[in-house]
Image (spheres, rainbow, N blue to C red):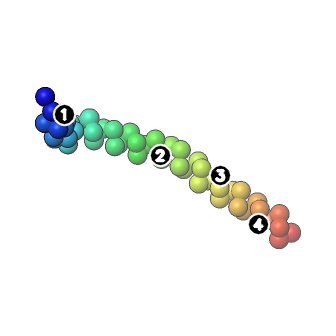
Amino acid sequence: MSSTAAEPERESAGRNDPSAGVQKVLLGVGWTLVGVPLVYGLVQTLRRVVTLFTG
């Protein structure tokens, strides 16, 4: 009844699980949805800061 015997089974099941690929895609979509507006906002802020301090 050792827990070490069950651990390799879980690891190998995770590698062949098709939902793992779906999760990676959803993670990428999520980061894109957050990252693009974030980068846009940072660029706009930096442009206005430059204008503010250079006159």
For label 3, the residue is 41
Q: From the viewer's side, name the closer residue of 44 and 28.
A: 28
Viewport quadrant of the N terminus: top left
Quadrant of residue 23 within the rendered picture: top left
3 or 2: mark nearer the eye: 2
* Sequence order check, earlier mark of 4 and 3: 3
Proximity of marks 4 and 2: CB atoms separated by less than 8 Å: no
Q: Tell which residue pokes out farthest to the top in this image.
A: 1
Residue at image mark 4: 50
Residue 18 in picture, x, y percent from top left: 22, 37
Which mark sits nearer the N-terminus, 3 or 2?
2
Disc 3 residue type (three-letter):
Gly
* Residue for point 65% across, 59% down: 43
Q: What residue type is labelled 2?
A: Trp
Q: Name the residue under label 2.
A: 31
Q: Kindly identify which residue carries mark 1.
A: 3
Residue projecting furthest to the bottom: 54
Mark earlier in primary sequence (4, 2): 2
Q: What element carries label 1?
A: loop
Q: Residue at x 76, y 60 (%)?
A: 48
Q: Which mark is nearer the camera, 2 or 1? A: 1
The picture places residue 8, in percent across and down from the top left corner, at 15, 40
Mark 1 or mark 4: whose residue is earlier in sequence: 1
